[in-house]
Amino acid sequence: MESGVDNTPLSSQAEGDKIQTPSQLVAAFERGHPDWVSSVVTAHGETTVVVPREHIVEACTFLKAWPEGRFDFLADLCGADRGVEEEPRFEVNYHLFSTTKHHRIRLKVLLNEADPHVPSVTGVWRTANWHERETYDLFGVIFDGHPDLRRILLPEDWQGHALRKDFPLRGYEPYSLK
Amino acid sequence: MSTVTNIPPQFEIVDRPLDTQMTISMGPQHPSTHGVLRLELVLDGEMVIKATPDIGYLHTGMEKLFEYKKYQQGIVITDRMDYLNPLGNNLAYVMAAEKLLNLEIPERAQTIRVLMCELQRIASHLVWLGTHALDIGAMTVFFYCFREREKILNMIEAASGGRLTPSYFRIGGLMMDLPSGFERRVAQFLDNFPKALDEFHTLLSGNKIFQKRTQGVGRISAEDAIDWGLSGPCLRGSGVDLDIRRANPYSSYEQYDFEVPTEPDGDVWSRYMVRMREMGESHKIVRQALPRLKPGPVKADAPKVVLPDREAMKKHMDALIHHFLIITEGFDVPAGEVYHPIEASKGELGVYMKSDGGPKPSRVHFRGPSFVNLSALPQMSEGEMVADIVAVIGSLDIVLGEIDR
């Protein structure tokens, strides 16, 4: 496998610095705040932390300022639909990156179809604004506390959320401006 | 001659200060918005009070389309996102799939990927330079830039058959090896390019008008830049030393010796200088990649994923069967999810790929650098003059195909 972002060079501690791997960082994070972490998955050299949605803002605020991790950069925020029959159906992925230590982790929030609400992290990173608008537009996930939650890619009078699995590829009917 | 005495009250001239605000819509047909970007500007006189980008005019549902196509068919969709840097998009996509498949890529293929991506980065920066200068009023640069870009596009065409949509990288390696004589063409280009770069500097960097239009315009501090998620030359223009090729090296970038240019001021001029210096660094990387091109395979040893050679298909039954299966049914990718970031010409291009098993992805998300960089436009442009908005948009180097997807 190509080296990619699996951060193996960082784990060797070759620099003499006590640089930690994301999985070590996550273990320390879990010890400090056990109720913020539902589960941890490590696969393909990437670490995923599933966070209960009521703690996502606290967890992000903590990780951003945490001197061990310094995850000060929100690289990406995207939604995903796990399938119509799945419950919880939706997930929101937060890809965090440290501009000084150069490691990455993924936070994941799972949401039920009946209640797709998650607190907004626009207060932590302003870049979350457009990412959350896009996720709202395409999946119908509602970010509570977002300052300007409007559709961003599709027209304002569009019906439905296009990236949900039950939305047909060609839409329900040809779109026309009303 | 008689003076008018009784003027009706609605035509009476009132001496009032400029306290009125005007809202104008800039774009989507404005030539300097680089496509179909619309800005809603609230102006006080000539000063911008508020700028609100309005995007989505080019939305084609590409992320939805990925879920209906096999993994190998998705590569051609990525070409159409950032159409100035299609090889970078190819690379991010195929490397995400390779990460899910745990594929080992041969050294020659990795070197060719680096070589082609750096050529593409120069081509992308040349379009940025030409159009950015054109927006500000320097027309000559445009022709010089496109003359150089033409040479790169001809090389990409020689290797892949496509100029704007090459789809040259495949999951597990390359479409095919480089054509004969390719190294000589690259070396010829490398010999002439520093002279061309000097020409651009002569035309612009010493130009007083260009300096006045760009220095101190559209400032963003390093903290704000990180907070807004800026990446690539826009982030390095604010003095943050961050390059994914260095921070999380991929495709053997850790073996190359190059500098990461940064400029401290965070204005349009800084972003200009970063990109200009980056072209020199890309030139350096291509120069180093050429002697690394040792003969060898360009496709991974994974017969269930990589298409077999034509000659093998004529002789071996199993090669024929694998070819038939890959084309008709695709290949199964184990369930899992990855996020693979690369340093594209515009910044961090990340691909989030999720597989539930089977030949089609369950979700593909592109973190387009242009999308995120554009979201910081209000921060940079508020308080500036309306004519400077054009300079700020140009310095962000946006491509709407990637923003709207």
Image: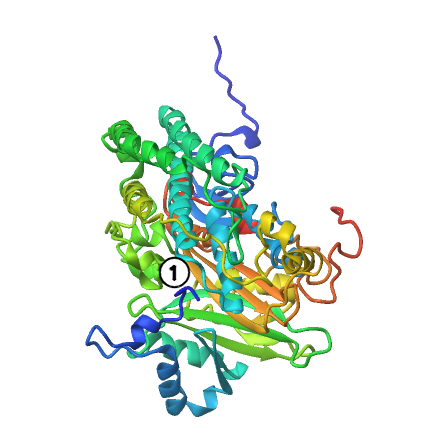
Q: Secondary structure at mark 1?
A: loop
Tell me which amino acid carries mark 1: Tyr
- Picture residue at 44% right of the left edge, 91% below the top: A34
Mark 1 belongs to chain: B
**How far across and down, in percent of the image, does residue B374 sit?**
46, 51
- Picture residue at 57% right of the left edge, 32% below the top: B10
Q: Crowding near pointer 1: few (<14 within 10 Å), some, many (20+)?
A: many
**How far across and down, in percent of the image, does residue B363 sit?**
61, 65
- Picture residue at 25% right of the left edge, 33% below the top: B205
Tell which of A71 and B81 is nearer to you: B81
Outermost residue toward the front in this view: B315
In the rendered image, the vertical position of residue B168 relative to residue A101, given as above or below: above
Tell which of A156 and B330 is nearer to you: B330
**How far across and down, in percent of the image, does residue B164 sit?**
53, 38
Would you identify the image quadrant in which residue A21 lies?
A: bottom left
In the rendered image, the vertical position of residue B186 relative to residue A53, given as above or below: above
**How far across and down, in percent of the image, does residue A3 sit?**
39, 65
Outermost residue toward the left in this view: A16
- Picture residue at 30% right of the left edge, 73% below the top: A10
In the rendered image, the vertical position of residue A27 relative to residue B280, given as above or below: below
Tell me if I can see residue B26 in this picture.
no
Would you identify the image quadrant in which residue B268 lies?
A: top left
Outermost residue toward the right in this view: A173
Tell which of B246 and B131 is nearer to you: B246
- In the image, B281: left or right of B111? left
Residue under label 1, please give it: B250
Would you identify the image quadrant in which residue B222 lies?
A: bottom left
- In the image, A154: left or right of B386? right
Tell me if I can see residue B97 in this picture.
yes
